[in-house]
Image: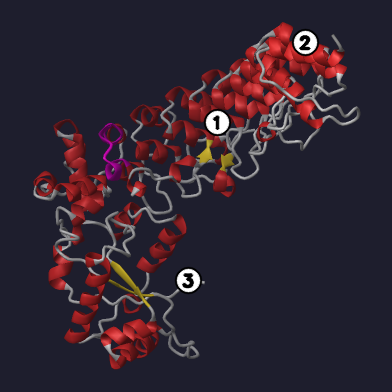
Amino acid sequence: MDERAALLASLEAMGLPEISLSDDSDGCDVGADELLQALVRAAFSGNVPRCRTALDNCAAYAVDSSSLTSNGRSGLLDACHAGHCEVVALLIARGVRPPQAGTGGWNGVTALQLACGEGHVACTQLLLATGDYSVAAVDRSGATALLKACAAGHSGCASLVLRSGADVDAARPVTLETALHAASTGGHLDCVRDLLRHGARVGLADQHGGAAAGHEVGGGPASAGGLGG
Amino acid sequence: MAIFLSRGSTSTGTALHHASWRGQPEVIHLLCAARACVRVVDERGRTALHAAAGEGEGAACVALLSHGAQCEAECVLEATPLLEAVEQGHAACAAALLQHGARADELDLLSLAALRALVGPDGQAAVNSAPAVGSPDEHAMLAGLPLEFAEQATRMAPVLRRLLVANAPPSQASARAVLRASGLPLDDQTAAWRDLARPSSELLMRAPALDAAACAALRAATDEACVIEGGAASEDSVDGLREYQLNLTSSQLGAIVGASALRELTVELPARFLTVSAAPGAPPPAPLRPYQIFARRYSATTRPWLSRLLTVASTLYSLRRKRP
């Protein structure tokens, strides 16, 4: 059995529909996307052996397994979203790295933001350990991994990114919403505690209230309030 | 319609505002322990206590009050937390605020009547110092309305319902309470707020502009466009019901009311208005030109609660300057 037939057989074994691999030796776009889609499916379902096979197939056809599929997904993004840390570990070990900035999968969200937003602590730890994922990165709505973790009340992930140097007061550009606003709205006490421990400023106002932050009504000594650090 | 159900203004502010309007007393304690200031205000001048009271979060009110939140704080529209609780019909918040010394005697009479109905016998002691006023029987009024109107009336802000549906005397409500309940965007509210302080000569001018035949023609045209054909109906910004409004161009208006009435409405009346409102010694202002012409028609079948307007006002001609 030649290499191409072996590849088709392995894809079929993974329950994939029939695919057509281009015979072009240099650029095989259709085939590349199918290979990446196979990786995504294996990663999303948390199937480590299939991921290994999919990675092997990518390597055999010189397809970069860090790339996004045509619909903006990737093995790493899906594994982080679903919280399969063994898959994440495998992908990282096999050299999968963040896609280039601006390639725009999943609304511009990074793997770290996905893991934090879903509360997958082990995945977050793995990603942070690589040093490839910036805690300052934002998605298209301007949300950092910290804000996503705090909005959903995932204090474990919030704590990890804070210890990795995340800006505790980072705000969305238009709404000026910070992680403390998000955690307070949701009533996530552990997140609020952690943010305050890391010096979050309690006097920051979001949306158009920015100019009003620090206004006091009813006079009173300026020191009485303490408008936040 | 949603303007009566959610105010939208509560979604901004500091973390303390967020915790307050979402009713998170434990977060409030944490933030205050971290020296968050309970007196900080948002863009509307509302404190966290306003936010909690306006959303009916009693536990959040108590938490804020325990950290020294001030009952007498007023927002830019001069509402106290107690007034917000009353206007939104939140009994637990009103009771908590009264217990912490909120002043009931500074409320307008309609709000006071609503407060008495809210807090019941237990809270009467705090309210008793204020003057008594008869509470309009809203339930009886609602029961007497056709179902579709009764449902709409229950969605209105309480002060509007008391005025429009229960026919409470307008002198019992403050104009500012009505303005707050209108659900207008903040910019419009503050503009109207400034207008309330203008001299009455700038606000009112009685000037008959249309004769009976012209009025009848205008009524018939509006009925035909909005009632019979069933078209041209958007929602009224105050009571949320269908607006019976006929939009017209100058020439269409002229065809309905006649050339002389058109000239009176679009040229002579605006000129008289300018004369009345001009500052003494100021250079003559540019003449006013109509930028929007429409006729609105409310009758007993489209607005059952407008009896006062229907019986008193024959025609209401309103002249508004377009904002830059």
Q: Based on the displayed image, in which of its 4 quarters is residue A214 positioned?
A: top right
Q: Which mark is residue B323?
A: 3
Q: Quick check: can you spot residue B254?
A: yes
| Label 3 secondary element | loop
**On screen, B38 above or below B113?**
above
| Residue ID for mark 1 | A182
Q: Based on the displayed image, in which of its 4 quarters is residue A115 positioned?
A: top right
Asked if disc 3 and disc 2 are in contact, CB closer than 8 Å, the reply is no
| Residue ID for mark 2 | A53
Residue A219 horizontal/vertical position (percent)? 49, 46
The amino acid type, in three-letter code, at marker 2 is Thr
| Label 2 secondary element | helix
Q: Is residue B89 magenta?
A: yes
| Region rendered in magenta | B85-95
Residue at 15% x, 61% y is B301
**On screen, A117 above or below B39?**
above
Q: Residues within 10 Å of mark 2 (few under 14, many from 20)?
A: some
Q: Earlier in the sequence, mark 2 or mark 1?
A: 2
Instruction: Compute the Cα span from label 2 to label 1.
Output: 41 Å
Residue B191 in the figure: left or right of residue A118: left
Residue at 90% x, 27% y is A25
Residue at 16% x, 41% y is B128
Instruction: Compute the Cα span from label 1 to label 3.
Output: 37 Å
Residue B25 horizontal/vertical position (percent)? 43, 25
B68 vs B242, nearest the viewer: B242
Q: Residues within 10 Å of mark 3 (few under 14, many from 20)?
A: few
